[in-house]
Amino acid sequence: MSTTTDLWHHYGRTRAERDRAVPETFSWAWSQDSGPGPELLGEVAGGTVGDLGAGAARHAACLATHHLPARVDAVDASPAQHAMATGLFGYLAPRLRIVRSDAVRHLLDAAGTYDVLYSVFGAVDFTDPRELLPAAAGALRPGGRLVFSTLAHYLGGAPAEPDAVPAEVAARTPGGEATTMRRWVLQEHVWTKVLDESGFTGIGIDTLPSPADAPRGAATLLVRAVRRA
């Protein structure tokens, strides 16, 4: 597994060439075409919001444009994704701030900053939850909200892990060579345990089913929690 190569170099590049519009809304589901929308974040108008593993920042751009927060920070460690997000939506500054940073490092530097944090198959999937979730709790104001969607099972259909351990999943280097990266695909009770240990309460988890005709479909875990006061 590479720790220095940008393994997100290719992700979203084709779509960015043909679709530069700010989305009207976003979906939490893996299929990105069903289920609830940003209302799960609660009232974000006037608040400070962080998107962890924002990629091209489409979800963050949607919030910044249509839901009037004071600021949305779209955080991603990938140089390629940061550049893509800046090219697509940099004009939405200062309400949208595109941040190139490791999610844990950013959160540790932002204690008590956020009203809401969220991740749509983003940093929560690709960062050790025993590091990310405590950092997220510290970056939220008391009573602040964390919402994230993650895989309910592996894309090949294998069940999620019964402990907080990652698997190596396929990835590509910028040059196209095959490699792997770590991804955490965990059962509901594991997420609940780590969230509780990290300083969260009010934990709720729903499962959004995969569309029956999706070729690489997967059910989604939709997780909500509140920073303990």
Image (cartoon, helix red, strand yellow):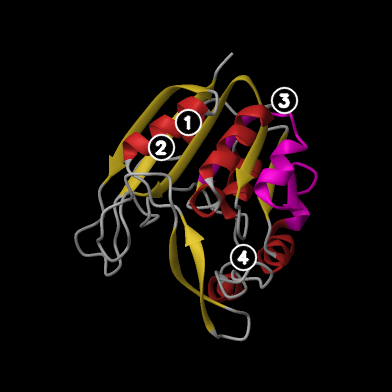
Please give the residue where the numbered disc 2 appears in the rendered image: 191
Q: Earlier in the sequence, mark 3 or mark 1?
A: 3
Q: Which residue is mark 3?
A: 112
Q: Amino acid at mark 3?
A: Gly
Side (left or right) of 51 relative to 149: right
Identify the residue under disc 1: 195
Mark 2 residue crowding within 10 angstroms, few (<14) / some (14–19) / many (20+) = many
Residue found 40% across the figure and 55% down from its top: 32
The stretch drawn in magenta includes residue 161: no
Q: CA distance from mark 1 to mark 2?
A: 6 Å
Q: Is residue 132 above or below residue 173?
A: above
Count of number-bearing discs: 4
**Residue 223 at x, y percent in the picture:** 41, 36
User: Is label 1 in contact with label 2 (beta carbons under 8 Å)?
Assistant: yes
Q: Residue 25: x and y, percent?
A: 49, 46
Seen from the viewer's position, the closer of residues 107 and 207 is 107
